[in-house]
Image: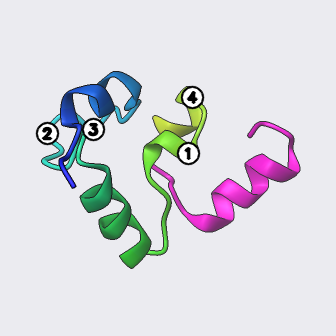
Amino acid sequence: MDCKKEKNLTLCNCSYDPCSRKGICCECIEYHVRKRQLPGCCFPKDAEKTYNRSFEHFAKLVADKRV
């Protein structure tokens, strides 16, 4: 399977500029799940910028109907 990095970058809202995984979704997901997190693309922009990508934070956003 070919990575569609350029297309993925148009949808990526990750605000961590030095990230080496930007646009490489499979690597990004693997990295974050290993840390019990979700990637930034799962969060609204303002929540993503907090860098709190924990499952718990995501669940709170869901409960608050923000996701």
Q: Nearer the viewer, mark 1 or mark 2?
A: 1
- Which residue is found at the position 20% from the left and 27% from the top? 6
Q: Is residue 52 above or below residue 15?
A: below
Stretch in magenta? 50-67
Q: Earlier in the sequence, mark 1 or mark 3?
A: 3
Residue 30, numbered circle: none
Q: Earlier in the sequence, mark 4 or mark 2?
A: 2
Residue 46, numbered circle: 4
Q: Where in the figure is residue 24, as x and y percent of width and height?
A: 23, 48
Q: Where in the figure is residue 33, as x and y percent of width and height?
A: 43, 71
Q: Earlier in the sequence, mark 1 or mark 2?
A: 2
Residue 16, numbered circle: 3
Q: Residues within 10 Å of mark 1 (few under 14, many from 20)?
A: some
Location of mark 2 (residue): 18
In this rendering, the count of numbered labels is 4
The residue under label 2 is which amino acid type?
A: Pro
- Which residue is found at the position 32% from the left and 50% from the top? 25
Q: Earlier in the sequence, mark 4 or mark 3?
A: 3
Q: Nearer the viewer, mark 1 or mark 3?
A: 1
Looking at the image, do the residues carrying marks 1 and 2 touch, with CB atoms under 8 Å apart? no
The residue under label 4 is which amino acid type?
A: Asp
The residue under label 1 is which amino acid type?
A: Cys
Location of mark 1 (residue): 42
Residue 59: quarter of image: bottom right
